[in-house]
Amino acid sequence: MHFSNIKIFLKSLLVQVLLNKENMQQDGYRILSDNKFNSYINTNPYFATIMLGFLNRVNDIRRVDLFASITAFIGDDLFWGNLKPVVCMISLVILFFRLDYSFLLIPFIFYFFLTNFLRYYGYKYALKNVDNISNFYSEYIYKGFRIHIGRVKFIFYGIVFILILFLILTLLNFNLNYVIIICLIVIINFFARKFNYYFLVLIFIIGLVWSIVK
């Protein structure tokens, strides 16, 4: 079973190699399933082994489509929408404080371990929970992690935001007019409950150009 898990894990790394607009990951899953599955499928690649375990126990294509959609939503939200931004923000903080570059391995290892842990144990998990697999998104193992990683993301967004403000104000020699403008932008976006980072980027570029011309 251990060797089988390794084999499935390694094959799952290549599930997106034949990705195309017509049938998405169909060719990848055909190879991953040893030609047992050959239908249109589109889901998040990190859930490839969980999807394979589900495919090996379920023949109803409607259930397959449903679960593929669920894992696509979960994967995009969890990995693209939360985990990757956290890794990016941590890396930016490390670079900002000019820490040893070896510290960049910390967020990388965290991301690498988590995603590949899911790939490695996903097949076994799916085989054991195939009857309840459609409710995976409501399980605490997902919901608990999703809540915490979302909080961590916004904490690091705040840290990076403060660092960007510091850089802007430093470049502008803490010009009072720019301080007022930045504060107004923050307040407006706070009440709008949606922060537009393009304003900060624009002000940062203006400040950088101004400091060079000046």
Image (tube, grey):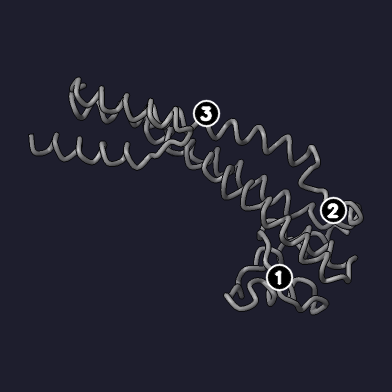
Between discs 3 and 2, the one toward the N terminus: 2
Q: Position of residue 138 (x, y in %)?
A: 79, 43
**Front-most of residues 142 and 106:** 142
Q: 197 above or below 136?
A: above
Residue that extends furthest to the left in the rendered view of this protein: 214
Cα distance between the residues tagged 2 and 1: 17 Å
> CA separation, marks 1 and 3?
36 Å
Q: Position of residue 47 (x, y in %)?
A: 72, 57
For residue 207, which quarter of the picture? top left
Give whichever of discs 2 and 1 has the lower sequence position.
1
Give the image location of residue 174, x and y in percent. Answer: 21, 21
Residue topped by disc 3: 155
Query: Which of the two labelled residues, at mark 1 and mark 3, occupies the earlier sequence position?
Result: 1
Residue displayed at 65% across by 32% down: 148
**62 above or below 131?**
below
**Position in image of residue 26 (x %, y %):** 69, 75
Question: At label 3, which amino acid type do we have?
Answer: Ile
Which mark identifies residue 133? 2
Q: Is residue 38 left or right of residue 202?
A: right
Badge 3 marks a residue whose secondary structure is helix
Q: Amino acid at mark 2?
A: Ile
Q: Decide: few, some or many residues near mark 3? Use Cα within 10 Å; few <14, some 14-19, many ≥20.
A: some
Q: Residues within 10 Å of mark 1 (few under 14, many from 20)?
A: some
**Element type at mark 1:** loop
- In the rendered image, which residue does mark 1 sit on? 41
Q: Is residue 151 above or below residue 209?
A: above
Tell which of 144 and 108 is nearer to you: 144
Kindly identify the amino acid type of the residue bearing the numbered disc 1.
Ile
